Amino acid sequence: MIQVEGLSKRYARHVAVDNISFTVEKGDIVGFLGPNGAGKTTTMRILTCFMPPTAGSANVAGFDVFEQPEQVKRHIGYLPENPPVYPEMTVADYLMFVARLKQIPNSEIKSRTNSVMERCAVTDVRDKLIAKLSKGYRQRVGLAQAIIHNPEVLILDEPTSGLDPKQINETRELIKGLSGEHTIILSTHILPEVEAVCRNVIIINKGHVVATDSVEHLKTRAGGGGAVLVQVDTAGTADAQTVHQRLEQIPGVSKVLDRVKVGERFTFEVESLQGENSRADLARAIVHSGWNLLELKSSGVSLEAVFLEITGAPYQATTAPAVEEVLEGEEQ
Ligand SMILES: Nc1ncnc2c1ncn2[C@@H]1O[C@H](COP(=O)(O)OP(=O)(O)OP(=O)(O)O)[C@@H](O)[C@H]1O
Ligand SMILES: [Mg+2]
């Protein structure tokens, strides 16, 4: 549904997007993820025919962005970084104006406007001037104008930017509800957003695509089986070092980090070799040693870890020791 081939964009001396290629399948919902300045908005402007590429090609909904911009525009809904709303119009008037622009038949304009206002939860402000709306409501009106003509492809540039947590959840739910019938690409630099909404992800950094993968698969790329936090109570039968050494001997364990000590309760972070999952062995070893296993949980190898790894910054496992006593000699 979206095919990008060797796309580049150069601004004066700066290459914002450098020879990127990717595909988005019909009905998919893809996160276009990257740090500030990565080239997300630039790519989206090209896909929506707001700007020509310097090189390469892009096909959206079956039309070439360079050769058939009118067709492309008819088949897409675009929420730009700054929603293109007219402050001096009321919400309902503005959406009816957009509906006319998008050539929705006269007989359907009212019903389409009403239904899109319902869907984007702006019905309660329908007669307010857009200038007087809060940023969150303005963003929702921006989303409403993007979907009013029921486009096949939605291109959303940071759709939840500036919203409060409740609005963020509502907007994510709305976007998720749109996938399937629409093909969606949404840009963000917020990782939980991708995890919450998207099936697949394209990671862009400094104008280069550095990963295209499913969210699930990307997460398992970091740290094999993932690190786990283990809390052990030895009831005075062993000190932290003894437990540490026992854990290190378990096959598949690559690293044990001392974390927190509260009385005779010790918490360790245990990393496994790539592809290994040592949880069952950890549990068995602790119980066989006569100690109590109080907790065994994932230390949260997240998409964030993968993202930082891929975009160049090293990932430091951080488990805040909170107010409890930290064991001496902790590895950094
Ligand atoms: N009109 C312009 N003229 C010159 N350089 C530009 C222009 N627009 C963007 N750039 C540069 O191109 C690069 C990519 O910018 P872009 O806006 O596409 O990034 P982005 O991934 O959307 O970032 P953000 O997360 O901050 O929105 C940046 O280095 C930016 O400074
Ligand atoms: Mg941007």
Image (cartoon, rainbow, N blue to C red):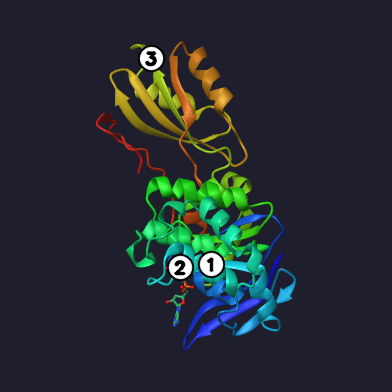
Which residue shows up at 55% across the image and 75% down it? Answer: 45
First along the sequence among labels 2 and 3: 2
Q: Would you say residue 272 is visible in this rendering?
A: yes
SS for dot 1: helix
For residue 245, above or below residue 223: above
* Residue 103 rendering spot, x and y as whole percentages: 64, 73
> What residue would you read off at disc 1?
96
Mark 2 CB near ligand 2 (8 Å cut): no
Q: Which residue is mark 2?
A: 83
In which quadrant will I find the N terminus? bottom right
Q: Given contact means CB atoms under 8 Å apart, are the residues at marks 2 and 3 in contact? A: no
From mark 1 to mark 3, how far is it between C-alphas? 70 Å
- Mark 1 vs 3, N-terminal side: 1
Q: Residues within 10 Å of mark 2 (few under 14, many from 20)?
A: some
Q: Which mark is residue 234?
A: 3
Question: Residue sitting at 66 percent across and 72 percent down?
Answer: 74
Compared across the picture, whether 99 is left or right of 164 comes to right
Residue 305 appears at what percent x and percent y? 48, 49
Element carrying mark 2:
loop
Amino acid, disc 1: Met
